[in-house]
Image (cartoon, rainbow, N blue to C red):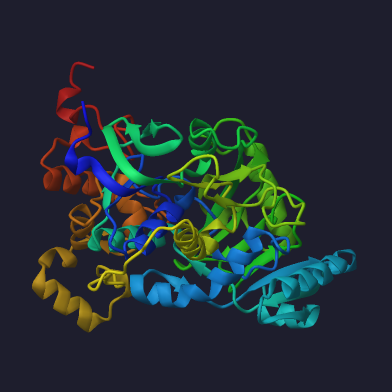
Amino acid sequence: MGIKENNKYDIIIIGGGVIGCMLARFLSRYELHILLIEKESDIGSVTSAANTAIVHPGYDAIPDSLKAKLNVAANPMWDQLAAELQFAFERHGDYVVAIGKEELPKLDELLERGKKNGVPGMRRVSGEEMRQREPNINPAVSAAIWATSGGVCDPFGITIAAAENAIANGVTILRHTAFEDFIWDKTRIVGIKTTQGDFASRWVINAAGLFCDKVMHLANVHPEFNITPRKGEYFVLDRAQFTVNNVLFPVPTDISKGILVTTTVHGNTILGPNAQNIDNKDDKENTSQGLDEVFEGAKKLVPAINPRHIIAIFAGLRAGGNAPCLTPGCDYQHDFIIEIPEQVQGFINLGGIESPGLTASPAIAQYVIELMKDAGEHLKEKKNWNPIRPARPQFRHLTHAQREELIKRDARYGRVVCRCENVTEGEIVAEIHSPIPALTYDAIKRRTWLGTGRCQGGFDMPRVTAILARELGISQLEVSKKNSSSKFLYRSTKDAGGA
């Protein structure tokens, strides 16, 4: 049986994280029929939903690596992207902080590396100046590097904004659709098999993140390459109890940028991550040992942190790979893989896109486009391509006059559902009926930020469950936290009499 006509595409993207969604958005500029598939119930719900939310300047990556080149190329793109896609982004620099004189030589190394990578706006700050800039910093600070191009963002907000803009420009996105295998015509990939059927395409792009090694192995590419999940654990602090003003990195280690203390676009302070290589690509459990490591590492930078300030913990996984640097003469390991393999036609392979993958994502998309052009793909720009994705109203950020006007148009914006974050029923309903509908509690949480305050959803959860059931036309017993195996409720209290 042949593939249905409406299942035929020019490009299929495997993976709906920030890389896949940014690729979809940039490629939607051209006259292409594009499909993006995501195996989870929501886009951006794995690595893109659980990370440090930093837009890196680019001084940490090894010179001449793809990581360095694409990080530095992408960094200045974020201001325009934030304006076009209307997501939260703040550029106020970041600091690498040396505690004690023994850490000073590492600052010199990073300054030199930053110069080689072409990072603008880096300068050394004395210990005294650093204490003035960040009152909570460890008094033993000896000096710091200030990189003015650093920033903070909302990673999931970026992912959803890019995906929605891609949809507005004609891209099809399917969730609950897991890649299973390729369809071949000799040495050319001509489609994919998924849990939702077969799809044909001229190009398939591997943007599968933690599972990119499985995808490339099925394409008979890089059998030696493997992803080792690197778990990072985090604390979230109550912004009403404690804040820092800056992004504070320690001097880096050989395997990570270290445990940092950073502000966020939401006003909270977060601590983390540590770096633990693990075997299970689904293991996002926090551990007491790991959390102790994070807390002690954070206190080295900011001793005033108190356990009583903590309101949440979480963990994320980074897709650490063992790829060599692809630049001639560069022997650096753990670089990005971004290529069109010679031995397979119709396949674009991305692998090992760990930090600074979020930062580099728009430059990665442009790099892939150039690879396609070099391979002979004629890309014709759409005359009606629209780069703007209008953001939906966020009640907590509106003036009183704007709130009154919004409530006049829709009274549901006058009913506050989450008191900690000031999220209204109107916002929740808007997300349920958005271009990528929020169908679970966590999907609404990531889009609106409800349930992230001091009560951690204790007040809003029953109300959100009722709204989801009403808007989706289902029983409250069918409403889930994140997927079909995480139902909130299993019976009405009136049915508990015989229990």
Quadrant where the N terminus lies? top left
Classify residue 265 as left or right of residue 378. right
**Relative to the observer, which residue lies in front, 125 or 244?**
125
Residue projecting furthest to the right = 102
Image location of residue 4, percent across then percent down: 18, 36
Classify residue 183 as left or right of residue 330. left
Image location of residue 399, percent across then percent down: 27, 81
Image location of residue 11, percent across then percent down: 34, 50
Residue at 35% x, 74% y: name it. 84
The reply to whether residue 56 is in sight is no
Residue at 78% x, 81% y: name it. 128
Q: Quadrant of residue 446?
A: bottom left
The count of marks equals: 0
Image location of residue 83, percent across then percent down: 37, 77
**Relative to the observer, which residue lies in front, 274 or 87?**
87
**Relative to the observer, which residue lies in front, 319 or 403?**
319
Q: Quadrant of residue 228?
A: top right
Quadrant where the C terminus lies? top left
**Relative to the observer, which residue lies in front, 435 or 71?**
71
Q: Quadrant of residue 148?
A: bottom right
Classify residue 246 as left or right of residue 414. right
Classify residue 293 as left or right of residue 215. right
- From this view, report whether residue 421 is shown above or below residue 293: below
